[in-house]
Amino acid sequence: MKIKACLFDLDGVIVDTARYHYIAWKNIANELGFDFSEAQNERLKGVSRMDSLDILLEIGQQKIELAQKNELAERKNNLYLSYIQNMTPEEILPGVIAFLDELHDKGILIGLGSASKNALSILNLIHLTAKFNAVIDGNKVSKAKPDPEVFLNGANELGVKPQHCLVFEDAQAGVDAARNAGMHVIGIGQAENLKNAEFVIPGFEDMNFNRLRSLYF
Ligand code: BG6
Ligand code: MG
């Protein structure tokens, strides 16, 4: 069998927190005196908090000191946390739970590979933590996507070789991280934002083990 483990990104793949990240950054941009569009936000998807701030400041052509950067990153996170604090399992994206359960039944290991330092809190809020055999989040890695570290650590924790891992990602940085790790990757979203993914699907509603088998086994 070719695929022994599936590694899932969190934001934008399992839950639609990408929207909350965007609104929080837009708030910070507006405060600094510039606008920030959804198209520009594509560049921030999958990228760590500090790297996201650097991209935002580049877009707004702002140069600021490290102390203010730390303060802005903290404020963005507090805004973000205030948006997600009432999340419930109902916000899990359609088809995700059924697909995870099917993978589990077929003996495929399940891992999380997220850049977010808030990933475990979110998994707990949506009652999904127990479905994962390994959780690698932003607290466990030193190099952000597109560096492969997060997915290689996931594969390592699961005891599966990279070539037997399949990653699900909604961000270009994440697709690149998976490829850099030597893994298979399916993009979630629109193909133009997900270059180098082996396949792109809109979400998990039509995804199931049979389809996976027809694609990879
Ligand atoms: C990724 C998101 O999952 O996590 C990014 O796609 C976000 O938008 C990154 O910047 C870091 O998240 P956090 O929660 O640690 O600020
Ligand atoms: Mg994502």
Image: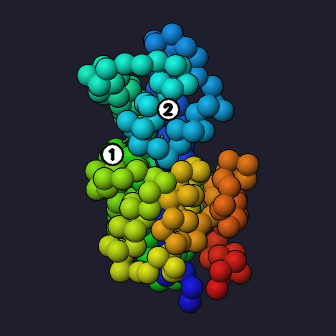
Q: Is residue 23 visible?
A: no
Q: Nearer the viewer, residue 172 or 93?
A: 172
The quadrant in which residue 197 appears is bottom right
Q: Is mark 1 within 8 Å of ligand 1?
A: yes
Q: Residue at x 44, y 70 (%)?
A: 110
Q: Residue at x 31, y 53 (%)?
A: 142
Residue 176: quadrant of the picture: bottom right
Q: Which residue is mark 1?
A: 117
Rendered view: 154 above or below 189: below
| Residue that badge 2 annotates | 55
| Distance from Cα at disc 2 to Cα at disc 1 | 19 Å
Residue at left offset 43%, top offset 30%: 53
Q: Position of residue 173 (x, y in %)?
A: 54, 51
Q: Amino acid at mark 2?
A: Ile
Identify the secondary structure beneath mark 2.
Answer: helix
Of 16 and 172, nearer the camera is 172
Crowding around mark 2 (Cα neighbors within 10 Å: few <14, some 14 to 19, many 20+) is: some
Quadrant (top left, top right, bottom left, bottom right) of the C terminus: bottom right
Residue 31: give x, y in percent of width and height. Answer: 45, 12
> Residue lying farthest bottom?
1
Q: Amino acid at mark 1?
A: Lys
Report helix, strand or loop for mark 1: loop
Q: In this rendering, would 123 be left or right of 62?
A: left
Q: Position of residue 121 (x, y in %)?
A: 32, 46
Q: How many marks?
A: 2
